[in-house]
Image (cartoon, rainbow, N blue to C red):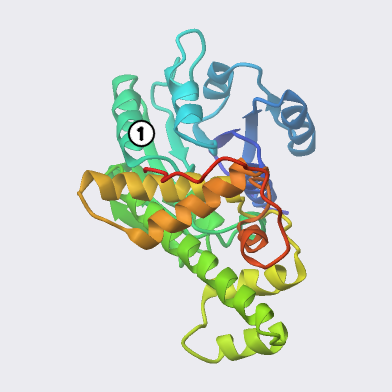
Amino acid sequence: MSPIMPERIGFVGLGRMGANMARRLKDLGYTISAVHDVNQEIALELAQELGARACGKLSEVTAAADVIFTVVTDDDAMDAIFKGRRDSLLQGAQKKTFINCATISPSVHRDIEKRAAKAGASSLEACMASSITQAREGTLYLMCGGKPEVYESVKAILTRLTSEGQTLRYIGAAGKAAEVKALVNMVMNINTAGLAEGLALGQSLGLDLTMLREVFSQTGANSRVLQTDGEDMQNRDHSCFFSAEHAAKDSGIALELAASRKLNLPLATATTKQFRRMVKEGLGQLDKSGIAELTFKGRHKSKSKSPRRRINP
């Protein structure tokens, strides 16, 4: 039987990543004391499974936990849980530690750290470069940003969510891990779009796509995306592990960073445009591999009748 760990842990945001991280820590003997999600039914189900309290208010999560993980969708969602006037995670947050795992703008992470400090709490960003399976198995790749002493105070917990610390990295001050995560996803998304175009052209030339993927894997065309998405693109299996909607958001964050440095990134710009088009065409909930639906000849008929316009970051 797993030993009982001293920290009481709360989770806010119970999507596929947050819920499976909570399950992983519960398996290891941690007390999952409180959970919260905008979808109360999901919160009730997970609370029953883990023996936790499903909290209707954010402040109730803070009161019931020592360490609170937040795994929300975007900047607005992050603002909502930390800045609410009537209800906020920072109410009664003295001596509590927040570990924020969402892929959001670096500036938001820096702002949350300041707000947490003002409330007598601590904040750390722990950006994830993994997916659902890794969350459940405890093999996440985590990039952390914030004060070194805060990182050290929760390192034992984070180690249990990674490959025993082998895939856990401290990047630097608040916002720096988020910058790295934005670049990871930007490059991944570019690779995904490039792979879709290579396979689409191969199909149009009458090439066997299984053979083509094998050749790609043995040459300079190889990539991690080929391993994770190539077969799915060929078979049109776009079960969602990382959605096109999130790909569009994350690539947009990278473009905003580039714009702040007056740097032109044509490949990232074109890729972001494709993922935003997926969202516009109603394909945003597909896995990022679904970008192939826009690329392979005859797969997707556009719903848009208006001329395409340049999408600024």
The one of 245 and 109 positioned closer to us in this rendering: 245
The one of 235 and 303 positioned closer to us in this rendering: 303
Instruction: Estimate the x, y position of residue 18 in percent, counting from the top left.
Output: 61, 42
Give the SS element for disc 1: helix
**Residue furthest to the left:** 262
Q: Which residue sits at x=50%, y=46%?
A: 308
The one of 213 and 102 positioned closer to us in this rendering: 213
Instruction: Estimate the x, y position of residue 151 in percent, counting from the top left.
Output: 36, 47
Q: Quadrant of the C terminus?
A: top left
Question: Is 263 placed left or right of 276 in the picture?
Answer: left
* Residue type pointed to by label 1: Val
282 to 87, vertically: above or below: below
73 to 259, vertically: above or below: above
Q: Which residue sits at x=75%, y=33%?
A: 51
The one of 312 and 105 positioned closer to us in this rendering: 312
Category of crowding for the residue at label 1, using alpha-carbon neighbours closer than 10 angstroms: few (below 14), some (14–19), many (at least 20)? some
Quadrant in which residue 125 is drawn: top left
Q: Which residue is mark 1?
A: 108
Instruction: Estimate the x, y position of residue 45 in percent, counting from the top left.
Output: 79, 32
